[in-house]
Amino acid sequence: MTKHTEPGGTLLLIVTADDLGMVPERDEGIFQAKAAGVVTSASLLVTGSTAAGAARRAAEVGLSLGLHLNLTEGPPVSCPEDVPSLLCSQRSWWPRQDGRQVEGDVAEMRGKMGLREALARGEVSIEEA
């Protein structure tokens, strides 16, 4: 949320919704808030399961978008073989973009605490970043 003062003393409030594109339910809430005049922009989580559709819909309804940079959670955008020190094998909870059910453990980013711990132990390769 940001406040700006327009010339003449009018206060302008900008409300940015977080994680557009993560899951359908969150997207719908953001679009309802936009329609109600509450939300003025959103951050698009490009690794989310509904990111492509949410971006199209945002353009249709005039919702301004910014990039939600995600370096710690869910599936990597890069090939897992290219960034192995940033990943761990774990049971996936992150929704997949293609809608497939995930079976077994998958290579995903370590999460916020996992990344911090790996950095402290010297396990993350800067050359991969």
Image (cartoon, grey):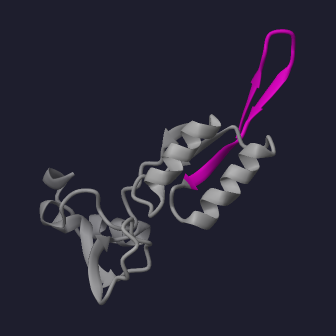
**Residue shown at 55% from the left, 55% from the top:** 19
Inspect this view and state whether residue 88 appears: yes
Residue 1 sits above or below residue 99 on the image: above
Quarter of the rendering containing residue 80: bottom left
**Residue shown at 41% from the left, 52% from the top:** 46
Screen quadrant of the N terminus = top right
Q: Nearer the viewer, residue 104 or 28?
A: 28
Residue 107 is inside the magenta segment: no
From the viewer's perspective, is 36 left or right of 100? right
Residue 5 is inside the magenta segment: yes
**Residue shown at 50% from the left, 45% from the top:** 55
**What x and y, as percent, mark residue 108?**
30, 72
Residue 11 sits above or below residue 14 on the image: above
Q: Which residues are magenta?
A: 1-19
- The extreme bottom residue here reads 104
**What x and y, as percent, mark residue 86?**
25, 65
**Residue shown at 18% from the left, 61% from the top:** 79
Residue 20 sits above or below residue 103 on the image: above
